[in-house]
Amino acid sequence: MLGALIIVFREMLEAGLIVGIVLAATQGVAGRGRWIAIGIGGGLAGAAIVAAFAGAISEAFQGSGQELFNACVLAIAVVMLMWHNAWMARHGREIAAEMRSIGVAVSEGARPLTALAVVVGLAVLREGSEVVLFLYGIVASGTSMGSVFLGGVLGIACGAAFSALTYYGLLAIPQRYIFAVTSWLIALLAAGMAAQAVQFLNNGGLLTAFDNTMWDTSWLLSEGSILGRLMHTLIGYTERPTGMQLIVYVCTLVAMYLLMRIARAPQPRREATV
Amino acid sequence: MKTLLVACLASALLAPALARADDFTLTIKDHKFTPSELKVAAGKRHTITVVNNDATPEEFESHALKIEKVVVGNGKGVVRIGPLKAGKYPFVGEYHEDTAKGVIVAE
């Protein structure tokens, strides 16, 4: 049972972390609960579908289907995160100001909650499909199913609890900084996902340029450890990054920064109003 | 991002033209890998076909090789590795980590 719990929890960590960050990033926006629920629900449905067609996906594109699929899912998530951050750069100030003055949730407005709902959905889909396959394997093998299945369910519960922990942890940040902090978290999240996406393309044999390993920090922090996995999701930690992964990581961060600079609304000049 | 996708698709079409150094096969049976140790030449690209003879799915995973690949029950999956520096690269079947483990030795 413990084994199943650990395996499922490990898979849930990434999705849990992302859901927690998204919840914190959308603090004070009406309707976010519904959108995030739609994201999770859609992700779960997608996970079941992906798991059901795992064999077919794997065999597509000369055996590179799974890698191509994962790379595309990650790429879409990166675009959505960029869109969200650009939007926040433009409107975050108003939302924060409104939250302070009214003290309640601001209206939904033109807020692109869809972007974050998609990000949540894709995270759940990617990690969830592995959980579904694992649990399916237990059902299929039929051995000591009860206790292992219980372990799996407990693993999911632990993942959800971790998500809540992330959320409440982020809420402890003073309100005037929270959007800045979540924007940076989302930028790092996106850079890590982009680096992961190019590695999937590499694994699929689709992009092999600059794929030499740059360094090895597995002695310092193993990617297999819980902390290693958390850092992998949070900032894209990879124990043996390739040159291409580094290039893409840095480029994503720079692109995100530039996009946020461009999107930022002109600041009202205080001197002028006096 | 669009250009990246276009580049991906373009390279997808070119992929079959890439030369492959060596092909290996790993077989999963009763949640164990055979062979559990695979010797490959360092500095080259290799293709490993993971054949799953169990009814249950397995995830071939190796952080050292940066690979995560689901192999469905009674199915197979292709894993591409390399170029590797000389050394040992452990891998596991994530769903049955107690028994499903092995190592790739590049030399």
Image (cartoon, coloured by chain):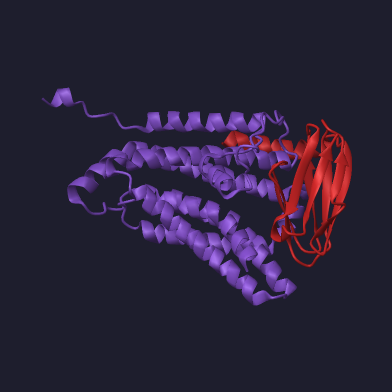
Chain colours: A purple, B red
Q: Position of residue A165 (x, y in %)?
A: 42, 55
Place residue B23 in its image quadrant.
top right
Work out whether residue A87 can be spotted: no
The residue lying at 54 percent from left, 67 percent from top is A154
Left or right: B68 with respect to A189?
Answer: right
x 49%, y 55%: residue:
A16
**Residue A221 vs residue B76, the one in the foreground:** A221
Image quarter of the N terminus of chain A: bottom right
Task: Describe residue A218's horizontal placement relative to residue B56 as left or right.
Answer: left
| Camera-side residue of A265 and A164 | A164
Rendered position, B87 above or below A66: above
Residue B3 position, x and y percent, is 60, 33
Please give the name of the residue rendered at 71% of the width and 38% of the height, measured from the top-left corner: A202
Above or below A156: residue A215: above
Q: Position of residue A29 (x, y in %)?
A: 32, 52
Q: Residue A22 location, x and y as percent?
A: 42, 50
Q: Is residue A71 visible?
A: yes
Tally of marks: 0
Quadrant of the image for the C terminus of chain A?
top left
Question: Depth check: A242 or A48 in front?
Answer: A242
Position of residue A247 in the picture relative to residue A202 (left or right):
left
**View extreme (top): residue:** A271
Residue at the spot x=69%, y=42% of the render? Answer: B66
